[in-house]
Image (cartoon, helix red, strand yellow):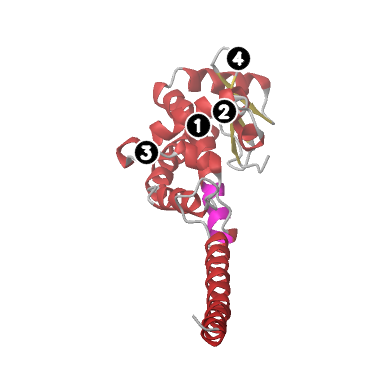
Amino acid sequence: MSLLTSLIQASTRFQQTLEKRPATGAEEQKAKGAGSAEALQPTGPGDDRFTPSGDTLGDTGRLKSQKLPLADYKQTVGQDLAFIRETLRHKLAEYNLNPASAISVNKNDSGKVEVGGNLAEETRIRIENDLNVNKNFTDAFNRLSVNEPTLHFMDNALKLNQAYGVNNSLLDTLISENQQFNGLQDLVHRYDTLRRSAPTDPFEAAANRGAYAFNLNTRA
C-alpha cells in the first residue's frame, strides 16, 4: 500500500468519525429530554400520592340530605304541637283564666309533667294533675320532647347548607344511605345516640332532655 493510499483511508475514517458525533449527541439529548418529560408527567388518580379533594364526599352528603322528607317530619311534629297547644288553651278556659295567660310545661326528674306560669298555686297544681292523667297529652309531650330538638337541628343544618353551601358532617352521620331507615324515629334515635356520645355544641339545645319545655303565650 502506497503512502498516498494510506493517507486517503485515514482521512476517510476521520471524516466518518466527525459525522457520527453530532448524531450521537442528538440522540443523547433526545433521551435526556424524554426522561425529563417523563419525570414531569403529572401523577394520575392511581398514584399513591393522589389525595381526593373531599368534594365528592360533600356532594354525597348534600344528595342524601336533599332526599329527606323534611315536610313530612314537620307535619308529624306539628300535629303534636297543635294538640298540646289546644289542650292548654282548653285548660285556661276550663279554669276561667285569661286566654293570653303565659303557661309552660316541662318534665321533672321523675318524668312527670310540671306546669309553670303566672298562676295561682292551687290552680297550677290542679292543671298539672289533669295533664298527668291525660295519657294522650303525656304521650304527645314525650314525643315532642325528643322529636322537636332533632327536627330543629336538621332544619337549621339544611338551611345553612342551602344558604351558604356549608355541609354539616353531623347531619351526614345521621342520615342513612338507605332511605327506608330515614324515618323520623330512626333519625331521632341516631341523634340521641350521637348527642350522648359526643355532647358538642350542635347538641347543646337538647343536651338535657329534662330541660325541654313547651311554652304557650310566651316567647321564653
Q: Nearer the viewer, residue 147 or 84?
A: 147
Location of residue 76 in the rendering, given as x and y in whole percent from the top left corner: 39, 40
**Which mark, by number, is residue 9?**
none
Q: Give me the C-alpha separation between circle 4 and circle 2.
A: 19 Å
First in sequence, mark 3 or 1: give its number: 3
Q: Give me the C-alpha separation between circle 2 and circle 3.
A: 18 Å
First in sequence, mark 3 or 4: give its number: 4
Is 109 magenta? The answer is no
Q: Give me the C-alpha separation between circle 3 and circle 4.
A: 30 Å
First in sequence, mark 2 or 3: give its number: 3
From this viewpoint, which residue is outermost toward the left? 180
Range covered by the magenta-colored residues: 155-163
Residue 135 in view of the camera: yes
Q: Amino acid at mark 2?
A: Arg
Q: Which residue is mark 4?
A: 109
CB contact under 8 Å: marks 2 and 1: yes
First in sequence, mark 4 or 2: give its number: 4
Q: Which residue is mark 1?
A: 191
Location of residue 87 in the rendering, given as x and y in whole percent from the top left corner: 47, 34
Q: Secondary structure at mark 4?
A: loop
Q: Amino acid at mark 3?
A: Asn
Q: Which residue is mark 2?
A: 195
What's the residue at 52%, 72% (across, down)? 27
Residue 106, located in which quarter of the rendered image? top right
Q: Secondary structure at mark 3?
A: loop
Residue 89 in view of the camera: no
Q: Amino acid at mark 1?
A: Tyr
Residue 80, located in which quarter of the rendered image? top left
Is 161 magenta? The answer is yes
Question: In this rendering, is residue 139 above or below 65?
Answer: above
